[in-house]
Amino acid sequence: MEVSDNLLVLLSNPQLLPELKDIAEKVLHNQRITFDEGVLLYEKAELGYLGVLANYIREQKHGDKTYFNRNFHIEPTNLCVYDCKFCSYSRLIKQRADGWEYTMDEMLDIVKKYDDQPVTEVHIVGGVLPQYDVPFYAELFSRIKAHRPDLHVKALTPVEYHYIFKKAKMDYATGMKLMKEAGLESMPGGGAEIFHPEIREQIAKDKCTGEQWLAIHEEWHKLGMRSNATMLYGHIEKYHHRVDHMEQLRQLQDKTGGFQTFIPLKFRNQDNQMSNVPESTVVEDLRNYAIARIYLDNFDHVKAYWAMISRTTAQLSLNFGVDDIDGTLDDTTKIYSMAGAEEQKPAMSTKELVELIKNAGRYPIERDTLYNVVTDYNDYQFAEAEKPRFYKLPVIN
Ligand code: SF4
């Protein structure tokens, strides 16, 4: 059965609410849905309906292709001058003994550990501390590029950039240009949380505002560069806050076209100041992926972090609009495990990740950061793992 057949079957269902039918017609005809329709999807649409629409869009854009990349993370510190209520990761400066603060040389040693490995990207993001300033990061990026020019540097969010540029009395345009010249090649999507001030002021009031987050990405896009965007969902926000968040991203994307990927981030409630807030269900996670895929018609990709939502939910998400699963990781990030994710030591070999995607009926493609194909794994044969050898032992009677 063609994927569009599923949509036609859905449209012929006499039980379908007329307003949901209108949205399905829009998706079939490649038309954008409105803010109110986005809220309506959250309020009224069932998982099966959302899956049909999101999967239709996903397969129109990518067929069965499912992307992943081989990366490792550097988290410079887990101490932070800010105090976001949902953050399980930051140890406030008063708890300094529980934290780590890598020096430049320690970070370069992490990069060197991967010298003989076929990783294509280093993802650098962590807490905010005064010693990590503009000169520090400019030197770090340039030394990474000098050491390994083919390694793509994807680093820091507007939370860090806003802080370090303000300290350096530098405007965003000047600062981002300087970072590009130092070796920065793209920006991850973090720090977005929920843009709407009603929520942002309750969960992350000290750090950059939603407008500032968007303005820094805009400056970066103006330099011809790419970035990603996230949304932290499933805590105290209402559905209209989620749609407002995606609406602001959609508008900036119309203007610049610089975003590659949207990544919904599930709120986890372990060991943070919002531990009383229950976590979203898997059904809600899948609904959220699907609505994001429907709403963000000008984003090429929707990504799931398997380390955050578990391997099985990541497989399921591939039928709800997701076309990218991040990444091999190699146990280099603590952000998810410290927030209570099931994966306490997140690492998957390339073979495991390829099998996870194939077992979900999809077509695995290793990509670089900018979605150029590195290896097509659909018909790829992995070398047989060496079998354990058995030795005949002398039998002693
Ligand atoms: S979410 Fe980021 S900015 Fe906020 S406290 Fe945690 S590390 Fe700091």
Image (cartoon, rainbow, N blue to C red):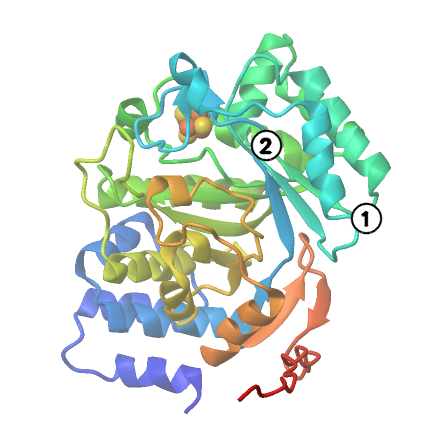
Q: Mark 1 belongs to which amino acid?
A: Asp
Image disc number at residue 95: none
As displayed, is residue 32 above or below residue 396? above
- For ligand 1, tell me if the residue under mark 1 lies within 8 Å: no
Q: Name the residue under label 2.
A: 156
Q: Residue at x 14, y 78 (%)?
A: 15
First along the sequence among labels 1 and 2: 1
- Quarter of the image for residue 209 reads top left
Q: Residue at x 24, y 62 (%)?
A: 283
Q: Is residue 365 left or right of residue 36?
A: right
- Quarter of the image for residue 13 reads bottom left
Alpha-carbon neighbours of circle 1 within 10 Å: few (<14), some, or many (≥20)? Answer: few
Mark 1 and mark 2 in contact? Answer it, CB < 8 Å.
Answer: no
Q: Is residue 321 left or right of residue 327?
A: left
User: Secondary structure beneath disc 1?
Assistant: loop
Q: Outermost residue, front direction?
A: 397
Query: Percent x, y for residue 363?
Result: 57, 77
Image disc number at residue 150: 1
Q: Residue at x 23, y 32 (%)?
A: 274
As displayed, is residue 178 above or below residue 194? above
In the foreground, 21 or 262: 262
Query: Percent x, y for residue 89?
Result: 41, 32
Alpha-carbon neighbours of circle 2 within 10 Å: few (<14), some, or many (≥20)? Answer: many
Query: Percent x, y for residue 47?
Result: 25, 68
Q: Mark 2 belongs to which amino acid?
A: Leu
Q: Quadrant of the N terminus?
A: bottom left
